[in-house]
Amino acid sequence: MIEGPTSRKAAPWLLIAPAVVLCIVLVSRALFHFAPRRIEGDTSAQRVAAVARLAAKDTPDTAEAIAEAAANDPDPAVRHAALQYLARFADEQHRPIVQAAAGDTNPSVRAGAAAVLGRYDDPAATARLMELAQDDDPAVCAEALKRLGPRDSADAIVLLVQTMERGGTPEIQQAAGKALARRFGMHFKGTPADGELWSKLITGVKQIDEVRAAFEQTNTPLLFDYERKHQMTKEHEAVCGHERDAKGAQP
């Protein structure tokens, strides 16, 4: 086959044509298709619904739009909703927004910030959660205590035990107890209103090796009700003795 002048001139264009088409497509998508999303609506209820719809799509610009609502929406209900969904996407670039929300005047927003802070596994997040665990609002305290439960922090363990023992309200004490129960895989029933049972639970938690180590590491005195501890030891020995006797009586 003999190539003519026209076919030889066309060959270079055949090589670069795909690249030109690709560039045109990318520029068009950048200009028109990926315009930043925004949370819009005339009422707070509409904007909360818009946050939920956008979070469900999980597109590349979802996190930025939700973060913008968490930072700037005038309604605390929308900021709270945005923080709840932001917990799915939160990364280091959203950290300033979450830190600011932790100091919001609205308690529901502070509670939402505590939930998101739980995703940041570092000493700074732990320290901020410990501050929120002593917030004036019980819901904020409860959320912060919940997020402190799994932290690899001796200070967090000490705070949880101390709060379980003598927190500001029974609800806060119970929130700390639940966080510790989840951490150590404990299954217990009871509330601070059940004085005797709750005291036994606290004594039991204080005897966990990791708890003892945390108090020692932080140079915090670990105080026991030694009379109750002795009573619990005797009860435990009695149960073990009955089990041994039952096994020995089997044929």
Image (tube, rainbow, N blue to C red):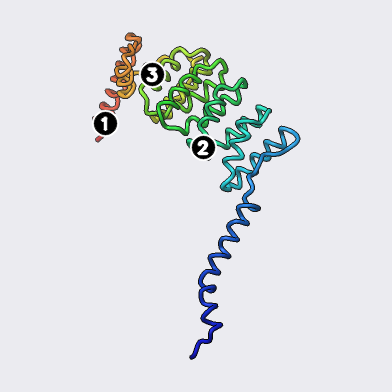
Viewer-side residue, 240 vs 90:
90
Disc on the earlier residue, 2 or 3: 2
- Label 3: which residue? 158
Tell me the residue at 57%/41% (across/down). 63
**Residue 214 shown left or right of residue 24 in the figure:** left
The amino acid beneath tag 2 is Ala
Q: Which mark is residue 40?
A: none
**Residue 76 shown left or right of residue 249 in the figure:** right
- Label 1: which residue? 247
List x then y, in percent, for residue 147.
Answer: 47, 28
Viewer-side residue, 150 vs 129:
129
Disc on the earlier residue, 2 or 1: 2
Q: How crowded is mark 3: few (under 14 residues within 10 Å), some or many (20 or more)?
A: many
Asked whether disc 2 touches disc 3, contact meaning CB atoms under 8 Å apart, the reply is: no
Tell me the residue at 58%/57% (across/down). 26
List x then y, in percent, for residue 86.
Answer: 56, 36
At mark 2, the secondary structure is loop
- Label 2: which residue? 90
- Residue 12 in view: yes
The amino acid beneath tag 1 is Lys
At mark 1, the secondary structure is helix
Viewer-side residue, 129 vs 36:
36
Viewer-side residue, 122 vs 180:
122
The image quadrant where one finds the C terminus is top left
